[in-house]
């Protein structure tokens, strides 16, 4: 869903809500109350610090490069298709299908420029909101997702109608773009590349497989912050997933 996101819903939404609040003569409290009531599940789900960074890569793992990413993985994993034009060429699996590594194609969001998608006042309101959180104004898509994922109820300034309106609009946006996952972690590899790791929901009913642990690791281009690189990793135990994830580097 986030791939199809247009920031118009943020900028335009913030201006519309702000105008409504100002006309009604309310403080920022009603906007916060609405946001918490409607988007509490999303607002209370924020990334944790990644706790598995010390898990080392086993000596018998072998290197693999795909889709702008390099990593180390168990030697028994085999590429499903050698044809580079095939989707299956980015999928590696062992014989008993207990471990899977799937490289996704890099996704280029394009340059972010809030000022060009709505009135300048909207971009300025967003910049002020970011600074109120101790953040620099949003310049890249990584900045955007990092701010959105960490948005929580206490970030609302109830003493400012405009800032509370921005918070309400961003709360809605978070409810739309937050990934469906069990856990979400901030992630930075040894090279300083930043992103997120998600423990994904398992299928339900007959499709459920309790023996599989699944994560997605996502890094952003450090030069632009506007291209994401992702790998899906599945195994019968969490340590295998995180050991592979800890070896991921952008292939610069």
Image: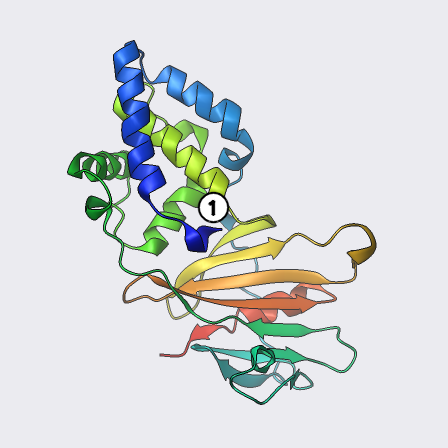
The chosen color scheme is rainbow
Q: From what the image shows, is residue 149 above or below residue 244?
A: above
Residue drawn 76% across and 50% down?
204
In the figure, 177 relative to 109: above or below? above
Residue 3 pos. (x, y %): 44, 55
Residue position for label 1 = 177
Nearer the observer, 187 or 92: 92
Left or right of residue 74: residue 25: left
Residue 160 seen in the figure? no
Expressed as whole percent of the image width and height from the top left, the position of residue 139 reads 25, 52
Q: Residue at x 49, y 80 (%)?
A: 66
Q: Quadrant of residue 249?
A: bottom left
Q: Residue furthest bottom?
A: 82
Q: In the rendered image, which quarter is residue 93 located in?
A: bottom right
Left or right of 19 on screen, residue 208: right
Identify the residue at the far top of this view.
25
x and y percent of residue 80 in the render?
65, 83
Compared across the picture, whether 81 is left or right of 144 comes to: right
x then y, percent, for residue 54: 55, 65
Q: Nearer the viewer, residue 13 or 241?
A: 13
Q: Residue at x 40, y 79 (%)?
A: 251
Q: Judge left or right: residue 165 versus residue 71.
A: left
Q: Residue at x 38, y 20 (%)?
A: 31
Q: Nearer the viewer, residue 182 or 240?
A: 182
Dot 1 alpha-carbon crowd within 10 angstroms: few under 14, some 14 to 19, many 20 or more: some
Vertical position of residue 95 compared to residue 151: above or below: below
User: How many numbered callouts?
Assistant: 1
- Report the front residue among 206 and 51: 206
Q: Residue furthest right?
A: 206
Residue ranking furthest to the left: 120
Q: Quadrant of the C terminus?
A: bottom left
């Amino acid at each position: 869903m986030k791939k199809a996101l247009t920031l118009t819903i943020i900028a335009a939404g913030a201006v519309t809500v702000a105008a409504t609040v100002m006309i009604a003569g309310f403080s920022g409290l009603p906007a916060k109350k609405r946001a918490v009531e409607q988007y509490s599940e999303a607002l209370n789900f924020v990334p944790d610090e990644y706790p598995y960074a010390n898990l080392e890569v086993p000596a018998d793992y072998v290197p693999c490069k795909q889709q702008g990413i390099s990593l180390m993985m168990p030697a028994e994993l085999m590429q499903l298709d050698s044809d580079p034009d095939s989707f299956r060429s980015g999928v590696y699996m062992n014989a008993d299908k207990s471990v899977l590594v799937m490289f996704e194609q890099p996704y280029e969001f394009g340059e972010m420029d809030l000022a060009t998608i709505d009135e300048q006042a909207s971009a300025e309101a967003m910049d002020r909101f970011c600074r109120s959180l101790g953040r620099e104004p949003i310049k890249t898509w990584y900045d955007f997702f990092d701010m959105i994922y960490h948005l929580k109820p206490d970030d609302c300034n109830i003493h400012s109608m405009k800032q509370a309106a921005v918070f309400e609009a961003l709360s809605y946006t978070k409810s739309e773009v937050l990934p469906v996952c069990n856990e979400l972690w901030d992630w930075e590899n040894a090279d300083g590349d930043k992103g997120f790791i998600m423990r994904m929901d398992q299928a339900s009913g007959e499709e459920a497989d309790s023996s599989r642990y699944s994560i997605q690791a996502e890094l952003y281009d450090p030069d632009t912050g506007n291209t994401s690189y992702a790998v899906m990793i599945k195994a019968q135990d969490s340590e295998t997933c995180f050991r592979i994830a800890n070896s991921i580097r952008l292939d610069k």
